[in-house]
Structure formats: C-alpha cells, structure tokens
Amino acid sequence: MSAADTRRGAPRFELAIFDCDGVLVDSERIANEVFAAKLREFGLDVTLEDMFERFVGHSMAHCMQLVAGLLGRPPPADFLDDLQRRTFDAFRRELEPVEGVVAALDAIAPRLATCVASSGDHDKMRVTLGRTGLWSRFEGRIFSAVDVAHAKPAPDVYLHAARSMGVAPARCVVIEDTPIGVAAGVAAGMTVLGYARHTPASRLLGAGAGDTFLHMSELPDRIG
C-alpha cells in the first residue's frame, strides 16, 4: 500500500483469514480431551496439557506420526476412525462458538472479506462450523491443509486461501491461536494476530505474531 493510500485512509487489509479450531469454534479442549483419553487406553500417560504442548496446531497426519512415535509402533488400523467418531460425538454434544466471535464477525464482515484456513479436514469443519452455526458465514471460502502439499507451519494453506480469494498476502491478516499457525501466517508474508486465550501471548509473539489479544471483542479494533 502506497503512502498516498495511507493518507487517504485506505484500509490496511482486504482479507481476514481465520483459523478454525480454537479461533472460531471452541473445540481444542474437547478434541484433545477425547484424544488424550484414547491414548491413555494404550497405556500412554498423557494429560490435556501434554496435548496442547505436543499436538495442537498440527495436521492429523502429523499427529498420527507423533502417536506412532509414542507407541513405538503404528497405531491400529481403526485408531483414526474411532478417534474421529468419538470426537464428532463430543462436538455434537458440547461444541460452541468461541465466546464473542459471532459479534466480532458481525463487526468485521462489512469492512473486509473473510475466510477460513485450517489444519483440520473438510469433514471436520462441516461438523464444527455446522454445529456452531458458522458454516453459512464462510461457505465457499473454507480452505484446509488437505488441499495443499504441506500443512502448517508451512505457509501453503494461507497462500492457497489468499490466492483463491484474489488478495495479495501483504493485504491479509491472519487470526491464529497456536505458535504453529502463527509461524505459517508469518511465512506466508501476512500480518498475524495471536488469540491468547489458551496459549501464552509470549509463545505467540515468539512465533512472530504482530500482536495478541485475549477476547474476541478486541479483534475488530485490532484489525481496524
């Protein structure tokens, strides 16, 4: 953006790209409690804190590699199907939008385009965004790491989202809640705002976030 654009008050961003889990839907705690319980069935002593430290923000393919490393062998063939079934059941019982995100979207949407770019696959997002009433807000503008060659922290899914939306990376702002996701947005050449509800702000800033915030009510002004 040129200096003249700045003087005219042109908006800094054209596109807000939202991560899904932990940013739009309050799914991280639910999914990782289910995941930890399943790992404990295999004799692994893992806590919810361990899950946030080791697994959150990674693609499921990478998580399965981590599980194989912890077990010392590949997990059973039905491991992922059973985990997904249990997780989706828990989502249907418990899942809600992140507190304040609906009002934040209402404030942001008139000003700039929005989309989703997630490490989760499309089936998962149909469940999570559908259960929380957010699917219709983003339908047709939902991008997954399964659509690209490399998952976060590579920038692929964010670059794919920007390209699909016709917006240059420098005009995009990413909203992320994990260091891995922040690193992906930074690698894509985008401005990243870190949602520090579950992850310490220091870790998000250390990964390259330009700023952090604690409640979604703060987001419209941070973007503005």
Image (spheres, rainbow, N blue to C red):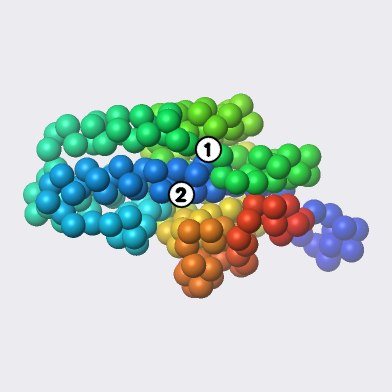
SS state under label 2: helix
The location of residue 84, given as percent across then percent down, is 30, 33
Disc 2 residue type (three-letter): Asp
- Residue topped by disc 2: 156
Residue found 59% across the figure and 53% down from its top: 174
The location of residue 178, given as percent across then percent down, is 46, 58
Q: Is residue 188 visible?
A: no
Front-most of residues 28 and 220: 28
Q: Are marks 1 and 2 in contact (CB under 8 Å)?
A: no
Left or right of 169 on screen, residue 67: left
Residue found 58% across the figure and 29% down from its top: 133
Disc 1 residue type (three-letter): Glu
Front-most of residues 102 and 194: 102
Residue found 24% across the figure and 45% down from its top: 37
Q: Is residue 95 above or below residue 185?
A: above
The location of residue 218, given as percent across then percent down, is 70, 57
Which comes before the other along the chain, label 1 or label 2?
A: 1
Left or right of 150 on screen, residue 170: right
Q: Is residue 208 above or below residue 184?
A: below
- Residue topped by disc 1: 96
Q: Is residue 162 above or below residue 54?
A: above
SS state under label 1: loop
